[in-house]
Amino acid sequence: METTLFMKVMLLLTAAMLCGGVGAYLGRGLKGLGSAIALFVVAIVGIFVTLGVAHVSAGGGIVCLAIWTGVVGAMIGPALDHYTESLGWHTVCGALVGTGGVMAICGVVGAMSGIDFGFLGMILGISLIGLIIFGIVSMFVRMSREVQMGQAVIGMVVFAGYFLFDFWRMSKAQNTWEAAIGLTMNLYLDFVNFLLYLLQFLEKSKEHSSSMIQPLHDTALAMLHFGGGDHLLSFASTATHAVQPALAAFGLC
């Protein structure tokens, strides 16, 4: 019996989550600006390396995918560590489960509803660019609690849209390991971005309405969706969340 593309992606995505979790645990103490920049560069290069190797060798692509997801995990480790201290491990675990639930629901709708979600591509891309620009600005300009909560809500809506879009693309893609690796990278970034925006929203919702405190982790992951498709923009969004702990340590945000 031939393994379907869906089964390949789910297998790879499960492994990616495990590698990312290990990376996040190992990288939770990497809060220096130098380490944040280094991980960012490695992750950017890793996108192209993984996609390039996957085009030549499925096995090599899977190995590169495991390494890359671990690097991205290490990059967001300080942000997750901050949210664990701020919200508690039980809230972070609940956010992980909630993000998984949103992914599952959107996955069913995107892949099985028969609706053509191709129209979302340009809308989501433009929205993501806006989020990235806002995230970069918010690294250096203090935003009110309400504005940060609004950003988080918009971010969750955008990446819920990407869940729909990427699962719809999966239903149309060729059944190859190369396609499975590319889709796994997209869905992994969708998951991480949605999770970080959800945690940002939960943290801001706990603060007093008068708070003007700049979030420590609200701008680092959304930039990856343009590398080889959508990856660079999504990664850029992730990166904006990841780099803020380092900036905060230097008193820059």
Image (cartoon, rainbow, N blue to C red):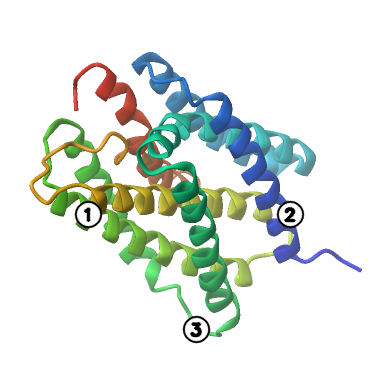
The correct choice, above or below, for 49 with respect to 133 in the image is above
Q: Which residue is mark 1?
A: 149
Q: Could you tell me how far apart the alpha carbons at marks 3 and 2 are, in whole angstroms?
A: 25 Å
> Label 3's element?
loop
The correct choice, above or below, for 231 with respect to 100 in the image is above
Q: Residue furthest bottom?
A: 114
Report the disc number at residue 66: none
Q: Quadrant of residue 175?
A: bottom right
x%, y% of residue 222? 37, 45
Q: Which residue is mark 3?
A: 115
Label 2 environment density (alpha carbons within 10 Å; few <14, some 14–19, many ≥20): few
Q: Quadrant of residue 157?
A: bottom left
x%, y% of residue 129? 28, 50
Name the front one of labels 1 and 3: 1
Mark 1 and mark 2 residues within 8 Å of each other at the beta carbon: no
Q: Could you tell me how far apart the alpha carbons at marks 1 and 2 are, in whole angstroms?
A: 34 Å
Q: Residue furthest right?
A: 1
